[in-house]
Structure formats: C-alpha cells, structure tokens
Image (spheres, rainbow, N blue to C red):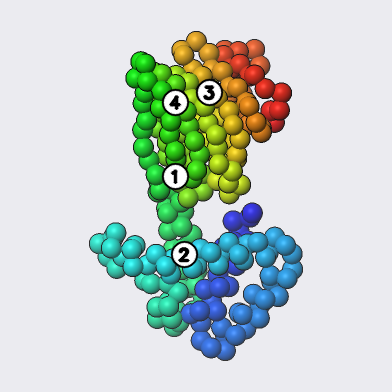
Amino acid sequence: MSPALVEHALSLIAATSIEAPARAARKRNELTRWRTMSPEHEAAYEEALRRWRFIGAMAPELRARFDEPLPAFPGSARKFRSRGALCVAAIVVFVTALFSWYLRQPSFNQSFESGIAQIAKLSLPDGTRVDLNAKSALRVTFYRDRRTVDFKGGEARFEVAADPSKTFQVTTGAGVVEVVGTIFTVRDRGNRVVVEVEQGRVRFVPSSPSAPPSSSVAANVYWRARTLL
C-alpha cells in the first residue's frame, strides 16, 4: 500500500473534521469521490481511518506518557479550524509519526531458556506453541505488525498461529526464517543451521543476501523440506 495514498486519505479525513462547515462538506464529497476511483484508494482510506481512530482512542494514554499535553483526536481537533490547510498538514505529520512510533513498541517481550536435561513447552500470546529442546534459548518479541524470535541456539519446534497481518520471523546465526502460519523446527548447535518444515511453507533470508550460493552462509543452512518458497 502506498504511504502517499494513505497520507492523502488521512489529510482528507482530517479536513472533514477540522475545517469550517462549508469546506468540510466539500472535503467529504472529495473524499467520497476519491475512494471510488480504485481499490487502492479504498484500501488507503481504510488504513487512514484506522490510524485516525487509533489516535483518538490513544490520546489520553499518550498525554500521560509525555511531559507536554498532546491534542486529542479527532474530537478536540476542531480547535485548529482557523489554521486551515497548514493545520491539516501538521496533523497528518503528527498522526503518521505517532502511529509509526506506536508500531515500534513491543506488546510482548520475554526470554526463554532450557537447561541441559530440560525440555520446555511454551504457549505464546498469539496462540503459537514452541517446544524448546534441551540447552536452548530464544527471545520472543511481538509488535503490532510483526512477531519476532531471536534464536540464540539449540533446537526449537514452532507451531505458528496463522495471522496474515503479522509475519512470524525467527532470526538465526545464518539468516531469518519467515512464515505466516506453519510448523517447523530450527536447530543450531554451533556448526550449521537446520530448518525442518513439517507443514506449510517458509522463506529464508540469508544474513548476507548479496553473497553467492557457495558462500559459507548458504552452505551452513540445511533444509529438510520440499515446500519452500
């Protein structure tokens, strides 16, 4: 989705809320026409509306996080009517920056480790199940738009809960394994990384994408699967 389309839709949404009544009505008509121009425009509008509502819902919490008060959206945005187009542009920048900041904040962050003769069964907040073999360690961090695992070493079997809006990424010493929902095992005992897929498909992104296939990075990754992207 084009960020420029989302920002344009956001500017129209903001204008319908903060402009004088006559101009706001014109902006509403313009927004309606713009949405019907293409599926991409409609998708951009839905994303912009989601961000606009998010800021409105988060305003009290955000004000508590910062020393200086932040304007509440969209209700109190009407205070800015007199500033016209300049105010709309400022609001778009504010909402875009704040939403980007919000996405970077983890919603879950925890490390797990198993002992020499210990096997751990983990249940993650999204429904994903992880079987951690002996002498293994990893850190799980969930964000609003992705799920990440920093695999420290050992062996772990992942039964990933499907969520097309949030990819599931496992970072290993040789690269990143990326899936949406599948069952696979990652093993790294220090000599090479083994990825064994039981169900579904995965994608592997090497640590050095520009390296040739004969490089040590590619040679150290062993696949036991035929259903790879």
Q: Nearer the viewer, residue 99 or 83?
A: 99
Rendered residue at 58%/22% (across/down): 195
Between the C-alphas of marks 4 and 3, the distance is 10 Å
> How far across and down, in percent of the image, does residue 9 sit?
60, 67
In the rendered structure, which disc, 2 or 1, sits on the residue that comes first in sequence?
A: 2
Q: Are marks 4 and 2 in contact (CB under 8 Å)?
A: no
Amino acid type at mark 4: Leu
**Residue of label 2:** 54
- Of residues 214 and 172, the one nearer the viewer is 172
Which mark sits nearer the N-terminus, 4 or 2? 2
Q: Quadrant of residue 119?
A: top left
Outermost residue, top side: 191
Disc 4: CA contacts within 10 A as few (<14), some (14-19) or many (>=20): many
Mark 1: which amino acid? Pro
Q: Up-down: is 148 above or below 131?
A: below
> Label 3 sits on what residue type?
Val
Residue 33, located in which quarter of the rendered image? bottom right
Write down the quadrant of residue 135 in the picture.
top left
On residue 125, which mark appears?
1
Residue on which disc 3 sits: 186
